[in-house]
Image: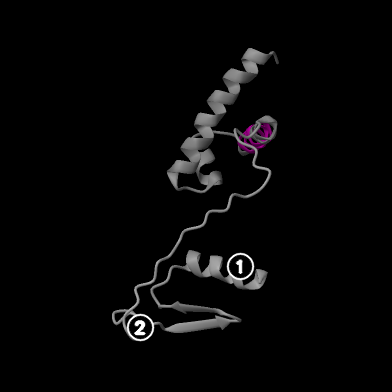
């Protein structure tokens, strides 16, 4: 099979496979209803997956990061005469050496994950 014929068949089978997947039916039932050989369906599905895998492996990432980037944000606490903000009531207080961290239940999972890494690195 020459390259252009293969490309045309790949496009046709991509459409067929996408229609099957979008139907919500089982592959077997869809193939039977549309008079498509199951053997051919699975053969072309395998061919298309392999070609997509090879193509994906050959692609180079647009940016190659050698090290993860780190960003710091300065936090300015609101301090009252007593030393603690009247509006903030922490649900958890973590102390390690000379650092004290007060966290509310509304803290995001991402923030907690980042803070966990900070305390493990100390």
The one nearer the camera, 44 or 111, is 111
Tell which circle, 2 or 1, labels the residue nearer the N-terminal end: 2
Residue 33 at least partly seen: no
Which residue is found at the position 66% from the left and 47% from the top? 67
Label 2 to label 1, Cα distance in Å?
24 Å
Work out whether 4 lies above or below 9.
Answer: above
Asked where in the image residue 66 lies, by quadrant, the reply is top right
Magenta segment's dominant SS is helix
Asked where in the image residue 105 lies, by quadrant, the reply is bottom left
Work out whether 5 lies above or below 57.
Answer: above
Which residue is found at the position 54% from the left and 45% from the top? 27
Quadrant where the C terminus lies?
Answer: bottom right
* Res. 89 mark: 2
Residue topped by disc 1: 117
Work out whether 47 lies above or below 84.
Answer: above
Quadrant where the N terminus lies?
Answer: top right
Q: Which secondary structure lies at badge 1?
A: helix
Q: Which residue range is magenta in the image?
A: 39-51
The one nearer the camera, 2 or 76, is 76
């Amino acid at each position: 099979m020459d390259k252009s014929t293969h490309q045309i068949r790949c496009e046709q089978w991509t459409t067929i496979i996408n229609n099957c997947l979008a139907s919500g039916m089982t592959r077997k039932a869809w193939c039977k209803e549309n008079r498509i050989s199951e053997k051919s369906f699975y053969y072309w599905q395998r061919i298309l997956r392999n070609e997509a895998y090879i193509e994906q492996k050959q692609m180079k990432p647009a940016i190659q990061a050698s090290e993860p980037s780190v960003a710091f944000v300065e936090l300015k606490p609101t301090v009252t005469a007593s030393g603690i903000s009247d509006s903030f009531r922490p649900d958890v207080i973590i102390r390690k050496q000379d650092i004290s961290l007060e966290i509310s239940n509304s803290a995001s999972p991402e923030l907690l994950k980042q803070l966990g890494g900070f305390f493990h690195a100390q």
